[in-house]
Structure formats: structure tokens, C-alpha cells
Amino acid sequence: MDSPPFDFDVIIAGCGPTGAMLAAELRLHDVRVLVLEKDSEPGSFVRIVGLHMRSLELMAMRGLLDRVRAHGRQRPAGGFFAAIDKPVPQGLDSAHPYLLGIPQHVLVDLLEEHAVRLGAQVRRGCAVAGFRQDDQGVSVGLLDGEELRTRYFVGCDGGRSTVRKLLGVGFPGEPARNDTLMGEMELGVPQQEIAARMAEVREANPRFWLRPFGAGVYSVVVPAAEVGDRATPPTLEEFRQRLRAVAGTDFGAHSPRRLSRFGDATRLAERYRVGRVLLAGDAAHIHPPIGGQGLNLGLQDAFNLGWKLAAQVRGWAPDTLLDTYEAERHPVAADVLDNTRAQTELMSDEPGARAVRRLLSELMDFNEVNRHLVEKITAIGIRYDFGAGPEPDLLGRRLGDIEVKQGHLYGLLHRGRGLLLDRTGRLTVGGWADRVDHLADPTAALDVPCLLLRPDGHVAWIGDDQQDLDDHLTRWFGGPTEV
């Protein structure tokens, strides 16, 4: 019996940053995409999130950075690890050595607009009720009774992912031990008094901060008294009580704009893929927001998965290409979970943890230590393991926005294709020209003769031999197109 025709090539559950980014990446390759979002309207709450260096580079690679940066506020790329106050380390290899604070709903709107402009469809008020998959595709059922047929289905539907639960993928880890209250509200005392009190309190309690937004509005973060139900937001009175307990004053808090709580639960999906169903973003991993890595981790999942899933749909993917999504991103998430666990311990008020924090603070006065931790938090230090034994250090790493004869590298990556950077002028992409661009540029700011970039900006090959290049083109981009 023939399977029913496909309504879409890929259906994505969840139109947060990860889902919207993935939809846009797929549309760069003419994949028919539908994004289902259970909420009827975009979230109206104000939550400031931070885009780290690697995510800013991804925005630059797709021509989005100027648009995103216009809505954000830059701050130095230092003091991320366990909120230990250290300057920006020297020698950061990025054209964007800063954090960009931006309201989350604004970022989601920008990414959704980008995806829709490229041709993605977004349906709001559509919740997934169930799905079943077979060898050819996935049938996705909605709560209103409609059923849609797709080649692949991706759950980007958050930490309480319906898709992950229905898929039966384990989500092992640790439940929350501590809760933290976070909100935006007005404070009724002078800013100088707030700054002085905050500096004093944070010496003993790094989980407390008050950050001004302007016009008397502050972001307020304070430890909760106990672990609560995160589906039920805290009250303003609860904030006042906790501020008095931690800081000795409630700062005249009033006129709340958004009140929420978050915990330090830490979990990682056992698998990122089962057949034709995949997981990305918070559906695959959750962790404390220390260091602001969660949203960035999800965006980078989408960037890694998008071109690989598109290759599968378009029919040119090598047999194991889609498997490399989990092979590459699962260890990255595991490392993020580990560093957030470590940071959580360092922010404890226990004597032993305070002693370790003081020792680490001393070590971070060494620039190499400070830089290593900043590179870890901001994801510019990631190196994927391509399993080829001893390799040049650059292989598997992302390439910075180097100067080329046409300006800067990232300006050549807007279409989401591979790129051969050829300083010899002797190589060719041949039958892969429909998937890989070629720039012959002896002036490119490289220390190697030639390299092949994947669409996500990671270095897939280094060398100057055509046959070796062809082998790696086949590995990452499938067989050549016959002319």
C-alpha cells in the first residue's frame, strides 16, 4: 500500500528561537517547511537574553546581524563564568567580542520574519496531539483532528517537549534543587543606593542581582525560598519577601512587568534522533541559565542540523550525514551541562564552595584561563571530532570572519552553502558546484593553502590535493552531479 503524499518536507513543533532558526536554514535549500506553535499569540513578556559570540557569528553568516544588533545592547564579553567579575580576556578570536542583550520576543519575531520571508509557513494555535512514523515519513496529528504528512518531524518544543515524550526518548539528569526568582519591575530608591547594596550583597550571594533597564525599571534576580511549581509565576510580594531576606530591603519594588522562576534542573536527551523524528534546543537539553548558554545552544543546534536535514530531503546527503547531528551536538550539550553544574556549585554559599570560588578567581587572573572559560561559555572554542586521527588543529573548528578579496568571509555564506577557500588557484569543486561555492583568493588571511567550509562555518578539510578534496566533498556533500 502506497503511503499518502507529503504535505511538507519538514514539520517543526515549536516556534521559539530554535524552531524559527531551523525553519530559515531549511528554506535556504528550498525545503517545504511548516512550523507549528501551540500558543496563539507570540509571548508578550519581556525577557532579556544574551547572544554570545558564536551566535552573533551565525547571525553574520546569514546576513542577520545588523538587523538583530539594532534591537540589542552590547556589553563586554567578560564575567560570564559563575558571575566571577573578570575583564574581557585578550586574544579572543572573533570579530564580535561582546554579549548582545536583546528581548527574547524581539529575537523570536526577527527570526520568524526571516523564516517566513524565505518561504516557511507558521501556524499558531496548533498543538501536536500525536504522530506515527514509517519508513517513508511521519504523520502528525493536531489537537483539532487534522493530520499532516511530512518526510521529517523535528521537536523544538521546549524542556517539557511533547514530541520527546511521545517519542519515548529518555531525559536523564537531576531535578531542580534550587529555584531563582526573575522579573522586571520598578524600584523606588535611587540607583546609587541600589548599586552599592547590590555590590555588597553579591559578595556573599552571586545569585542576586539588580540590573537597570532605564526609566526606573530593573531586572531583578533573587534566590527563592524553596523549589516551586514553575508553571505558577511568583507574586510581587514573594519578590519583596525574598529581597528583604537576602538584601535586607525590598528596594521599594512595585509595578511588575514580568515575574517568573527558574530552577537548576539538568537533563540531556538520550538520543537526538529516532528514525525520521529529531529533537533540538530545550527539547533535547535543559540546564541552569548560568552563563546564558541555553538559547545559544539551541540556535547552534539548528545551524548544525539545518543543512544536513535539507541535504537528506534534497537527496544528496551521504548515508551518515544526518547521524553527525547527534554525534556532534550531543557532546557539546553534555559539556554545557557540566560547566553549568560547576558554575552552580561555585555560586553556593557553603564554605567549601566559597573557597573553590576564591581559588578559581585567582586562576582567572591568568589570561589563558580566563580566555578558555569565555571561549567555552560563548562556544567559539568548540571543535567537532571528525574521527580522522591526528588532525590539524583548525579541522573541525569554526573559522572566524577573516578578510578575503570580496570583503569578509561571512558575507559569502548567506546562502547556506559550502565554500572552498583556495589560495592556490589550482583546485575546483567540479560536480559539487550546485552545493559548494569556490573562492580562489591567494590573499585570504589563512595559514593553510586551502580549506573546505561546511554551511555551518566549520572547517571540513585542509590541504591542496584535488583527489583528497574530492574525497572530502563526497564525505560531506554526497556524490558529484553529472554534467
Image (cartoon, rainbow, N blue to C red):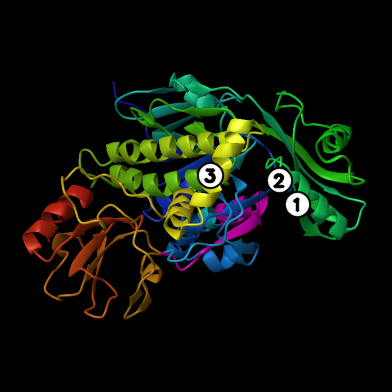
**Rendered residue at 53%/29% (across/down):** 266
* Residue 382, percent from left and from top: 37, 50
Q: In 3D space, how far apart are the residues under numbered discs 1 and 3 (Cα atoms)? A: 20 Å
Q: Is residue 372 above or below residue 385?
A: below
* Residue 72, percent from left and from top: 64, 62
Q: Which mark is residue 359?
A: 3
Residue situated in front as seen by the camera: 250 or 299: 250
Q: Which residue is tagged 1? A: 199
Left/right placement of residue 421 relative to residue 175 reads: left
Where is residue 78, by image quadrant?
bottom right
* Residue 230, percent from left and from top: 70, 28
Front of the two marks 1 and 3: 3
- Classify the position of the N terminus by image quarter: top left
User: What is the span of residues highlighted in magenta in the rendered image?
Assistant: 93-113
Q: In 3D space, how far apart are the residues under numbered discs 2 and 3 (Cα atoms)? A: 15 Å
Crowding around mark 1 (Cα neighbors within 10 Å: few <14, some 14 to 19, many 20+) is some
Where is residue 389, by image quadrant?
top left
Left/right placement of residue 116 relative to residue 429 reads: right
Magenta stretch holds residue 104? yes
Is residue 24 among the parts visible in the rendering?
yes
State if disc 2 and disc 1 touch (CB < 8 Å): yes
Residue type, mark 3 in image: Leu
Q: Which mark is residue 203?
A: 2
Q: Is residue 23 above or below residue 114?
A: above
Front of the two marks 2 and 3: 3
Residue situated in front as seen by the camera: 249 or 129: 249
Residue type, mark 2 in image: Glu
**Rendered residue at 32%/59% (across/down):** 417
* Residue 327, percent from left and from top: 31, 37
Crowding around mark 3 (Cα neighbors within 10 Å: few <14, some 14 to 19, many 20+) is few
Crowding around mark 2 (Cα neighbors within 10 Å: few <14, some 14 to 19, many 20+) is few
Magenta stretch holds residue 89? no
